[in-house]
Image (cartoon, rainbow, N blue to C red):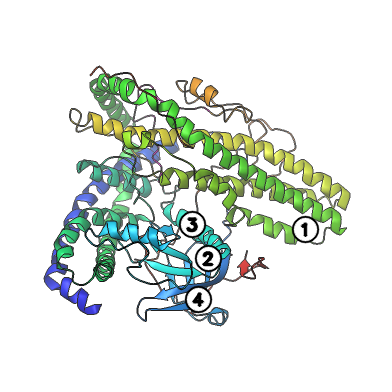
Amino acid sequence: MGDVLSTHLDDARRQHIAEKTGKILTEFLRFYEDQYGVALFNSMRHEIEGTGAPQAQLLWRKVPLDERIIFSGNLFQYQEDSKKWRNRFSLVPHNYGLVLYENKVAYERQVPPRAVINSAGYKILTSLDQYLELVGNSLPGTTSKSGTAPVLKCPTQFPLILWHPSARHYYFCMMTEAEQDKWQAVLQDCVRHCNNGIPEDSKVEGPAFTDAIRMYRQSKELYGTWEMLCGNELQILSNLVMEELGPELKAELAPRLKGKPQERQRQWIQISDTVYRMVYEQAKARLEAVLSKLQLARPAMEAVIRTDMDQIITSKEHLASKIRASILPKAEVCVRNHVQPYIPSILEALMVPTSQGFTEVRDVFFKEVTDMNLNVINEGSIDKLGEYMEKLSQLAYHPLKMQSCYEKMEPLRLDGLQQRFDVSSTSVFKQRAQILMREQMDNAVYTFETLLHQELGKGPTKEELCKSIQRILERVLKKYDYDSSTVRKRFFREALLQITIPFLLKKLAPTCKSVSAPSPPTVVSVVQDEEVGLPFEAVPEPLPPASADSITELRGLLARDLQAESPPLAGPLLNGAPAQESPQPGAAPEAASPPASPLRQLPPGKASDLEPPKPSDQETGEQVSGPGGRPPIHTTTEDGAGVQTEF
């Protein structure tokens, strides 16, 4: 295969790739430098004015549960160099990088792992036919016959394949369907976590980066959700380059590949992966250089912003009013004719699976705590309470126990609507809702832990403790009902805007080319109210738990002011402060929990269509860690299949 790379990626072509990559990066980084100043101003203004989201009822962990093993077991992996299958001991630590060891003995002896896989941007495939279809689509003219493998032959009927549009692929297989289902849930959790890559606590660099990505793609007349907006900044930037570079490279090299379809596919996969790694390294150097420059300039920028804050705000509002006066009449017509008739269908499609998922989170939490309480009663002592609580603390990160919650999002469909609004995939909405489910589960668990710890300080008897557990459980569930309602409201709003805003931009672009809507620092777009006055805004309000899932009620609240929030159901808790059994006025909790960071150091329900009125007008990569880098295992359990699973 080395000869294939040297033939098709000679020095001249590598130089051309580097120059093309450099040109794309230069253009993007101009957008990034501009947006850095805007994000810095917005962050400083937010700190001064103190505006923010509604206060949460549940607590969140200030110190993440690091140094824990989420899952481990054995996998058969296909080795491309030797073309053989090898049994590997595999584990998933708290940062969700799949770590592969030669065997369990090597792990126990702290021998460096063979590979660490960052799965951002990957798809989990469970059949060779799925894989053949994707590979065939990636290289036209090389479609293989159904049932044949372009790269490998799986020794069992239960494969798991990690597929990426640009980077290398990974091939695993299991001995049973149960093992396949289990590892599919684990690997999908890795993908979900790593895709949610840019931390929300990055108040300047994150928003500046995502806005620059959006503006660069809009300059190329590309709108809407971009399913490659996943991973950390370098992975996303590499995907951006490959979006433009890949088709050109494919058109040039595909006709020159020799051999049978399977061999040409194999060659293209390796060429694409090699180019992706070249792009990643170049993007890393360029982005780090610009970040260093901006960090040096930041104190001076902050001084200017602080001195001229009032003048900047006045100028911004004046300019916004001028733009709004020009755009609003056209936008109103477009929204009325092309967006508003479809809002009920969009909401219905989103609400049913999402609400079922959050209800399942509540049910799983209730069951786990109730089972723990029964165990305390039946065993006749509270000596094992610490062991039970240790397992409960990992509930939100247990891929198998949370799977029933995540599965509720899988039926999400935007049939008809997806094509109308040019939504490439619903996966971004599914994964965002699943991340929010996990956050709410962890917040509920942590709040329960905090309240129970305070109760244990009173030295209760076993009977008193069991009554306290039940009382605390009921209190936490009330707080969960309120928070989950608020979180769902925000998610529906984000999803509505992400579906409709790009559609509006594309419709209005011919006459309003220079005006664009702002974008958020997360995978799911959040359009800031102060910067976009969307006519007929579809903004569902937080509702009491009894009516949160009512589509009829939600539709009736679409046009109401976003700031009108529901009253708290229970007094919010302060992180690190004594909990009160009754609501305390004026108590303010910490901000919402930020999502966990990914492996930043690694390289490379069906909606019914409505007939509208007639209009009048991952990188991914491998990295071998150094000796001693293995995270310790705190506790170990063994599932029914006999595979070691650490929590």
Q: Residue at x 53, y 69 (%)?
A: 91
In front: 102, or 595?
102
For label 4, the SS is strand
Label disc, if present, on residue 188 of the rendered structure: 3
In front: 168, or 14?
168
The residue under label 1 is: 385
- Residue 332 x %, y %: 30, 20
Q: Residue at x 58, y 45 (%)?
A: 440
Dominant secondary structure (helix, strand or loop) of the stretch shown in magenta = loop
> Which quarter of the rendering shows the C terminus?
bottom right
Label disc, if present, on residue 530 of the rendered structure: none
**Amino acid type, mark 4:** Arg
For label 1, the SS is helix
- Residue 398 x %, y %: 60, 57
Packing grade of label 1 (10 A; few <14, some 14-19, many >=20) is: few
Specify start and end residues of the magenta stretch as a single range. 523-541
Left or right relative to 190: residue 400: right
**Amino acid type, mark 3:** Gln
In front: 190, or 478?
190
The residue under label 2 is: 92
Q: Earlier in the sequence, mark 1 or mark 2?
A: 2
Does the magenta segment cover residue 524?
Answer: yes
Tell me whether circle 1 and circle 2 mark residues in contact (CB < 8 Å).
Answer: no
